[in-house]
Structures are given as C-alpha cells and as structure tokens.
Amino acid sequence: MLPGVSFLNADCPYEDADVVIVGNTFDHTTCFRPGSREAPNAIRQASYNFETYLFEHGVDLCDIAIHDAGNIEPGIFPDDMIIEAGFYLSQVVRDGKFPILLGGEHSVTIPAVQAFRDIAVITIDAHLDSRDSYLGSPNSHACVSRRCADHLGMENVMALGVRSISKEEAEHEDPVPYIDSFTIKEKGMEWAVRKALDSVKAEKVYLSVDIDGIDPAYAPGTGTPEPFGLTPLDVKKAIGLIGERMVGFDVVEVCPPADNGNTAALAARLVNEALAVWKLNRD
Ligand code: MN
Ligand code: MN
C-alpha cells in the first residue's frame, strides 16, 4: 500500500472501521487517454470540497467509521493487479466491511467482484465492456462485465446507461444484458434501476460506476468520453434505489489529465452518496 492523502473523514484504523476505501491506480489497458492512475488521489483531494453533513439524508459522514487503505500497488500486467488487489479486497469482504474502490481503469472492478460470492453486479457505463478479450487481454477494461458474468452468472449482471457496443459484442452468442441511455432518457432512471433490481437473481448488489456512463458535459475527465449520457442525478438516484441491497461500490475511469477538476469532484460526491445511503440502511 502506498500512502496518499486520505479521503475526507476516513481516519479510522482498519480494525475499527465499517467501511474501507481503497485506491487502485491500474490503467495499463486503457486504449485512448491514459491517466486514471492519478484518479484515486485526485478524488481524495476533491472530497475536501464537501460538507460531511448530507442534509437531504440527515447523515453526517463523521458518524461513519471509515478506513482509507491508500493505494494498491498494481504492477504492469492486469493478471498481477488482479492477484494483488484480490488479496486485499478478499480480506475486506471476509472481515465484513463495506468496500469502496477508487479506480483506476474499469478492470479494477474484476478483483473486487471476485472477492464476493452470491452477488449481482450493476454497472453504470457508456460501454458494455463485454468482450471476451481485448488487445490480447481477457482482463482489459473492455471485458469487465463478461468477467463478472463468468464469476456470478450472466443472470447477475446488468449494465445501465450503455450507448456504445461493438458489433462483436452485439452479435455475441451470450450477450450481457443492458438498458441503453436512450431508453433510460425515455422511461426514467427509476424505471431502469427497478428493472435491473428485478432482473438480477442475487439479493446483494455491487454497484460499479464507470464515470463515462455520465454525459461528458458533466464528466469530461475520462479516458473514452461518449455523448448522450446519464446525468449525475440519475446516478444519485440509482445509489438510493439500490439502497440496502448494496454491498460494495466503486467509481472508475476518472482521468485527471483530461479533467478540469469537476469529474474528480463528482466522483468524490458519488462516494459520499454511497456512504450516506449505506449508513441510512445500516441504522
Ligand atoms: Mn467501463
Ligand atoms: Mn466506459
């Protein structure tokens, strides 16, 4: 673990913590705009923008025992990263703590999900990320939802906000289920999240937020910006609706070299939202 600035109010020792925040700076399979390795610390710094009190929830983050573990040293190869991160995250899950992961590119979600059994994964993402392998790696950020399905079953994966699917993915014999951003714009985020929660088989849900699921107008600082996206309020609503079923959370693909600061701030605020919703459902 490499020390960095701790996330806002995450000053509790590991043993006493109920929530563990951990960064994973891995970004070596990123194809277009690398730089998400800088995101964990940029998100931590941005967290100091915010009040610890979330008035709309009546929750003060100071009342949550949060440990910030710093950043996992991921190495160069995705397989090494998955072993290294998996080792730590399995311990967090075994100890019954709620993990919040700061990416890094989206492949950091793979070891986090593999640390669990009997859960579903809902992703928020512009991309389906369902390739069997990409540029020679089955653990590329373009393969995340398929690796989750390998581990949990296809019936326990759902992608929300998708608007970029390769022909190879569209014609795959075993496609990853999704609700596209155009349908969500028509029918609303509440409809989409309820449909996702009804369709997955497992009760417990890990929510993975690829920041490019949100429109680049709100989240410009990302590796592969894609127009026609969700709004930050859509994602806030999703976190609240998943509510007591949420057992883990991540925010990935923030790219500080491409950011004006607002994307890291949005990611930090989504972490605060997940913390507040976790706290409300625990009390
Ligand atoms: Mn992704
Ligand atoms: Mn994406």
Image: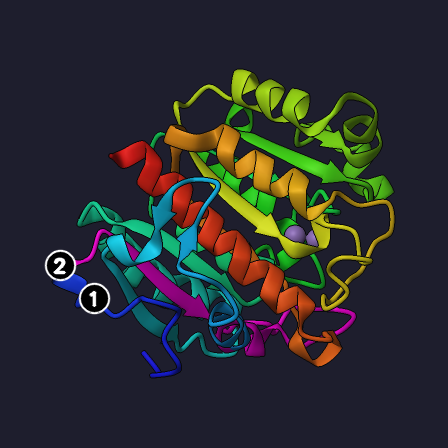
Residue that protrudes farthest toward the left in the picture: 15
- Give coordinates of residue 178: x percent, y percent: 69, 30
- For the residue pair 42 and 172, the one nearer the viewer reads as 42
What secondary structure is found at the residue carrying circle 1?
A: loop
Q: Residues within 10 Å of mark 2 (few under 14, many from 20)?
A: few
Horizontal relation, residue 230 to residue 110: left or right: right
| Front-lying residue, 114 or 51 | 51
In the image, is residue 78 part of the stretch drawn in magenta? Answer: no
Please state which of residues 45 and 176 is positioned toward the viewer in this rendering.
45
Q: Mark 1 points at which residue?
A: 12
Ligand 1 within 8 Å of the CB at mark 2: no
Kindly identify which numbered label has been placed on residue 102.
none
| Residue 188 spot, x, y in % from top left | 73, 25
Tag 2 and tag 1, C-beta contact below 8 Å? yes
Kind of residue at badge 2? Asp
- Residue 16, position as x, y percentages in the image: 13, 59
Task: Say which of 24 and 9 sits in front.
Answer: 9
Q: Determine the residue positioned at 37% across, 65% down.
A: 22
Q: Is residue 85 left or right of residue 62?
A: right
Tell me: residue 74, above or below residue 160: below
Q: Which residue is drawn at 40% across and 45% down?
A: 276
In the picture of the structure, the residue carrying the numbered disc 2 is: 16
Answer above or below: position of 197 versus 207.
above
Quadrant including the C terminus: top left
Q: Is residue 29 magenta?
A: yes
Q: Residue at coordinates 22% horizontally, 51% vertically from top-left?
A: 18
Q: Tell me, yes or no, if residue 23 can be seen here.
A: yes
Residue 205 percent across, percent down from the top left: 43, 33
- Looking at the rendering, the stretch of residues picked out in magenta corresponds to 16-41
